[in-house]
Amino acid sequence: MKLDHSIHKGGVRVSQIETLATVKVSKSDDLYKVVDSLNRTLKERDLMFGLSLDEKDREKMVFTIYET
C-alpha cells in the first residue's frame, strides 16, 4: 500500500512514505523501546517503524514498517 504523505516545500515533494508490513502483536509496556531503537538505528536506511494500539482490541498493538 503506497501512501502519499508528501511534504511540499516550494512545490517540491520532499518525501513519500510506503507501508512495507503491518503485524498485530500482544500489548507490551516495553515494546515502544524496541521501536525507538529501530527508528534510531535504521533511519539512515530510509526505514521507519510505528506502534499503535489496535482500535478494536486494546490488548493488541499494531507494529508497522515504513519506507521513507
Image (tube, helix red, strand yellow):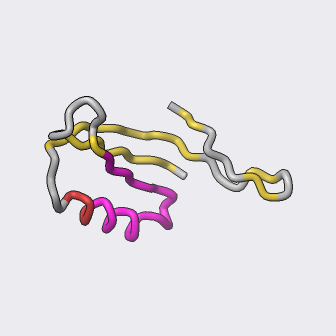
Q: Is residue 27 in the magenta section? A: no
Residue 60 falls in image quadrant: top left
Above or below for 18 versus 68: above
Q: Residue at x 48, y 61 (%)?
A: 45
Q: Residue at x 25, y 65 (%)?
A: 33
Question: Going by the image, does 68 lie left or right of 38?
Answer: right
- Residue 17: where, in percent of width, then height? 56, 46
Q: Residue at x 57, y 37 (%)?
A: 3
Question: Going by the image, does 26 lie left or right of 13?
Answer: left
Query: Residue farthest to the right?
Result: 10
Q: Residue at x 31, y 68 (%)?
A: 37
Residue in the foreground of this view, choosing between 27 and 49: 27
- Residue 26: where, in percent of width, then height? 14, 43
Q: Is residue 37 in the magenta section? A: yes
Above or below for 6 versus 56: below
- Residue 2: where, in percent of width, then height? 55, 34
Question: Going by the image, does 28 lie left or right of 52?
Answer: left
Instruction: Tell me the magenta residue range.
Output: 35-52
